[in-house]
Amino acid sequence: MIKNESMSRYGPLVGAIDEGTSSARFLVFAADTAEVLTYHQVSISQTCPREGWVEQDPLEILRTVRECLRQTVFNLKQLTIDPADIVAIGITNQRETTVVWDSVTGEPLYNAIGWLDMRTASIVDDILNGIRNKNKDYLKPLCGLPINPYFSALKLKWLLENVPRVQEALAAKRLMFGTIDSWLIWNLTGGANGGVHSTDVTNASRTMLMNIVTLKWDPTLLSFFKIPAEILPQIRSSSEIYGYIQDELLQGVPISGCLGDQQSALVGQMCLQQGQAKSTYGTGCFLLYNTGTAIVDSSHGLLTTVAYQLGAHASPVYALEGSVAIAGTVIQWLKENLEILTNIKDCETVVEQIPADNRIVFVPAFAGLYAPYWRKDARSIICGINEDTTSAHIVKAALQAVCFQTRDILEAMRKDTGLVLSKLLVDGAMTNNDLLMQMQADICGIPVAISFCH
């Protein structure tokens, strides 16, 4: 890069849009040192209109991202740093959450259906009833994923079958589908006025519609789910210029990178060598294990996913993934639903009130159980309660539940790969809880190395 003499003392800057399940933020880094110069973060709401349904407003997501962009640019000016020094922006996002919108008006045709949403359980049952032995891994050789409500194809299928506005837009050839990355890229690059309809290989690998080998939308999968190809975004690599921002504050800045949130954490933790792994503790907990250019077909309940593809002509790198649906969500539930925590940060103080042993077992299966069980019919349970049980016992059991599920995933990875991790790299908001991280190290029997860039 030829350095612009007018650049600030920090040199060229890189921006990162991080759109997660519960919040969005925009961070600005000094490209030469990776120092975070400033950021702004805003919470995002979600609604549960029926049991098992989880929705978010796509327009709220977009407004929140734009608010983060505006405030971070303001912060830069307050620091006497020129926002024009931002030379590129990347996007990372919650992955399987599904959005459909009108290509002419740009209007969402339904709320975004969240990755935790379970409304498609009956569709999954119908599909499995038509497959020999009800084999949930029937499509795994093509897409690397089990047939489960978690993935976008099922959510899109539900929208096409149940929402008249979606059906009308399809008939009028105005229907567009995307995960959150596609929704943001399209809007930020112009929307109805020439917006780019793209996704990257990591997000596409979570739809059940992309062939894990060819990295293209697969005709067999599209036919299986009855998804029309013309509504899908173009699949691109994780590192190339998708388009240029048209919003006034950052006009002309290229969007030049895109990764699903868990894959971006793998890259951020520098797990770029085969055999390296990381675990992210957020709304859910996700452990990814780099398998290099080899596609490893798990026989122990893990997903095969694309880890990254750093350039249009680069070879894709793959990963095994274990997904725990409920992690940070259970702490939020203890606070808001049971009201036994006044503050999420109180976990450590509360748990320290009880002895080391804890006979309470909590299985938080609010959205069924993900890897390695894949039991959409599982329901939450708390057992072992007696007259001596207190709220502190429940809180400790909730933390232990996250750790035990992570251990199950590590054990599945060991069985699939024959390798035992010497340490576990971790990130995400829950890693601020020292007690939880010590529990995780003790339960898994390996050191836990915490990233402080979460």
Image (cartoon, rainbow, N blue to C red):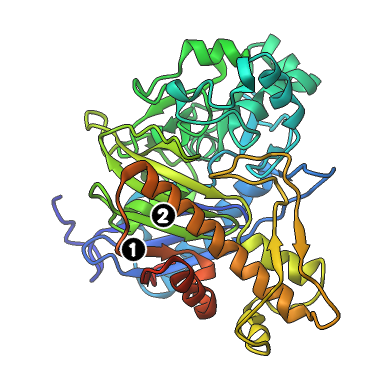
Q: Position of residue 173 (x, y in %)?
A: 63, 12
Count of number-bearing discs:
2
Residue shown at 33%/63% (left/top)? 29
Vertical arrangement, residue 345 with respect to residue 127, above or below: below
Cα separation between marks 1 and 2 = 8 Å
Q: Residues within 10 Å of mark 1 (few under 14, many from 20)?
A: some
In the image: residue 56, left or right of residue 196: right
Residue type of the residue flagged with mark 2:
Ala
In the image: residue 156, left or right of residue 119: left
Q: Secondary structure at mark 2?
A: strand
Residue shown at 47%/36% (left/top)? 203
Residue labelled with disc 2: 16
Q: Quadrant of residue 160?
A: top right
- Marks 1 and 2: CB-CB under 8 Å? yes
Q: In this orientation, does residue 227 appear?
A: no
Vertical arrangement, residue 39 with respect to residue 131, above or below: below
